[in-house]
Amino acid sequence: MHICFISSEFPLPNISFGGIGTFLLTYTELLIKNGHKVSIVGVNSNEVDTKINDVSIYYAKKSTIKGFSWYFNSKSVSKLIHKIHQENKIDILEAQEGGFAFVKIPTGVKKIVRLHGGHHFFHAFENKKLNFKKAFLEKITFRKTDAVIATSEFVKKQTSKFIDFSNKNNITINNPIPVSQFYPADKNKVIKGAAVFAGSICEKKGIRQLCLAIPKIIEKFPEFHLYIYGRDWFFPDGTLYKDWMLAQFSDEIINKITFRNTVTYAELPKVYEFAEICVFPSHMEVQGLVAPEAMCMEKVVVFTEYGPGPETIDDEVNGFLCKPLEIESISNTIIKVFNKREEHNEIGVNARKKVIGKFSPENIYLKNNNFYKSLIK
């Protein structure tokens, strides 16, 4: 099959990327490995026509015309899709929520919306007003699509509260975790008391609440130290979130945190390896990749009990869940984790088993491939 993705987030060389970029990197490798042809179309600050790991990437130059950029970007993407389709027939075209809105798609191409978390999904959790334009684009996209793939049961349930897609073919398929890359960690490399956070340094990732939980944690476990790896995030006025956050902290907290430079996806296992625990108290996730990645390395993980948290972790069996908006819940959970040090090996082994059963690339590929075939038939 020829599978084409509408996305401007495929990881280009020397460019940092987030969850969707990670998904595309891992998933397209699976598709190529199993004999499929893969193309990516989107827009970028510069025109791109290249191949990375046998994935054909076509980016049109992003429009800068204020108020009409959406129109010209859609027109450019439509041209690219038709050009690719003429040269090598596209069987499946995938996009995120809103991705098909004003894009013209060749007849006969099956369209799939993969739910990575759109505007309808996030506006409710971020207490923001529904943006009419973004909501409109998503509704048009869902009308045009043939099928929907949700990356968690939670994102399917929440999105369906705002957009009815019950009349479309739909299925839940998690994003894959490359289990061979996230190997069982060497226990001899663990630094006692070291906790690792990985993710964007912004409010919705729960990093501020995690830091504010430190004073209570170090009363019981003074060896605790938090290592933070993540991309910087800025407020609309240009203020760096990290600076705004640090201004609120006491010296007691600041002395127990260390910011490290971001690392490549390939280097991420080395970050998790030295951690005694990994903590990701996100306020909300669609699926969340960092938690199962660390679990795959047999790490003891503290994750959010909201959203897809309970789909990923069975509390106190293969990890721990906390209420990320409650500082006391975070501190109490981490204290509980350290009090159960004699159980860490068992919990870590259970964690890797859970990830292999739920997120292994082979299982995820088969589910996607079977779904594609059912649509084409």
Image (cartoon, rainbow, N blue to C red):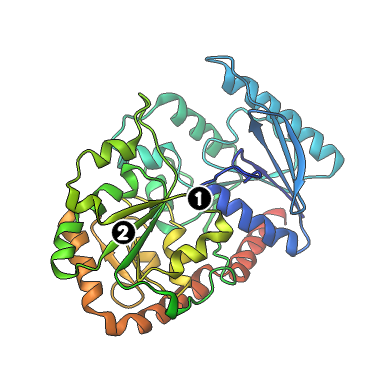
Query: Relative to the observer, which residue lies in front, 116 or 135?
Result: 116
Q: Residue at x 43, y 49 (%)?
A: 230
Q: Is residue 333 above or below residue 115?
A: below
Which quadrant of the structure image shows residue 202?
Answer: top left
Give the residue at the far right of this rendering. 87
Quadrant in which the C terminus is drawn? bottom right
Q: Is residue 173 above or below residue 13?
A: below
Is residue 240 placed above or below 201 in the rendered structure? above
Q: Secondary structure at mark 1?
A: helix
Where residue 112 appears, x then y in whole percent? Answer: 61, 47
Which residue is the site of mark 1?
A: 19
Q: Which residue is mark 2?
A: 226
Residue at 26% of width from left, 47% of height from top?
208
Image quadrant in which you'd find residue 277: bottom left
**As shown in the figure, which amino acid type bears the numbered disc 1?**
Gly
Q: Quadrant of the N terminus?
A: bottom right
Please state which amino acid type lies under the numbered disc 2: Leu
Q: Position of residue 327 (x, y in %)?
A: 18, 54
Q: Quadrant of residue 100?
A: top right
Dot 2: within a 10 Å radius of its alpha carbon, few (fewer than 14), some, or many (20 or more) residues? Answer: many
